[in-house]
Image (cartoon, rainbow, N blue to C red):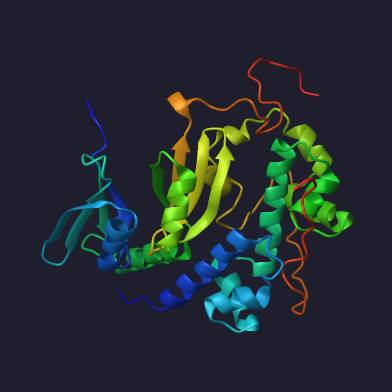
Amino acid sequence: MTTPGLAQLRALRQAKDAMDRDWADPALDLDAVAAYAGYSRFHFVRAFKAAYGETPGQYLSRRRIERAEELLRSANLSVTEICGLVGFSSLGTFSARFKAETGVSPSEYRTKHVRNGAALIPGCYAMLWTGGFRPRTEAAGATPKRPAERPAKSAILEKRTEPPGA
Amino acid sequence: MIKSLALTTVWSTDQERDKKFFVEKLGFEERTDMDMGGMRWITVSPREQPDVQLALMRPDGPGMDPDSAKALVTLVTKGVLGAGAFRTDDCHAEYAELRAKGVEFIHEPQERPYGIEAIFRDPSGNWYSLTQEREHDELDMSKPWSGDCVTEDKPQG
């Protein structure tokens, strides 16, 4: 079957899957992800955004926030610990990104979801609903601002600290 | 009365490749592969469930206009469509085995209230859950999956 752009779309999907799989790997920077798709970094960012509606850096940041949301709902960890676990090196940046995505601060989020049965939903569907496979357009009670694209020179993955007691 | 599920569709951008994937990598059984004139009808079944078939359908077959076919191919290839969930007795072992065969996983096995779950893709881009369910379909309520998961009414703080 010949559909124009199919090979590129497949490559972009594989690059996105690589981010989903290896988001905690400090070696996975934008160059490495672009290499999956066989693009130069510049073209990769553009092509990815055209296909998925946000840049690879924004996508990755959002996935880490989703990860943080799950940890806030399910794990007995402090906000600071979770911040480190999901790969943000600065608590301030993490809190700001988290609020931009969800409309509330991490601790407010935890209080709010303490009796929500979200985890009873199969993870793959929860992932769909929380925008795991598509750009999120709105969050509960807020229209989040998309985080600004990171400078092209910085790796899309910040160094991750080891989980406490791991 | 509807008795049970007989067949469901999996959109395939390359029927031959995807048939090989299901048979050789996932260990499914080939049930049908026939030329219907203008379309190839291919179905596969999980080994222990011969009464359920997956039809590997080309999106550009008869009955699908070119625009719709193109949209569908794009969605499948982008990887935004899920095509179902499969059961396994041992998610970790099955995950290791399939990964060794080169199956693309998006998620390694994770603890979930309903069991242990990994997510993989077929070569077209459809995603599937691979789930080891808990005994008797029970939910594990021992962990705070989403904080305080209780059923009785409590005033919201």
Residue at 64% over, 81% down? A41
* Relative to A39, residue B82 above or below: above
Q: Which of B13 and B32 is in front in this view?
A: B32
Left of A79 or right of it: where is B88? left
Q: Is residue B40 left or right of residue B21?
A: left
Q: Is residue A113 left or right of residue A164?
A: left
Position of B119 relative to B123 (above/below): above
Residue name at image x 25 percent, y 32 percent: B4
Q: On the image, which quarter does residue A23 sit in?
A: bottom right
Q: Relative to the observer, which residue lies in front, A61 or B89?
A: B89
Residue sitting nearer the eye, B35 or A24: A24
Q: In which quarter of the image is residue A75?
A: top right
In the image, B152: left or right of B107? right
- Can you tell which quarter of the image residue A3 is in? bottom left
Image coordinates of residue B5 in percent, x first then y, are 26, 37
Please say if B40 is above or below A6: above
- One can see residue B58 in this view: no
Residue A29, image x, y percentages: 69, 72
Q: Can residue A57 be seen in this view?
A: yes
Picture mark count: 0
| Residue A33 locus on image (x, y percent) | 61, 73
Quarter of the picture containing the N terminus of chain A is: bottom left
Residue at the image position 25 percent from the left and 53 percent from the top: B55
Q: Residue furthest right?
A: A92
Q: Position of residue A54 (x, y in %)?
A: 64, 66
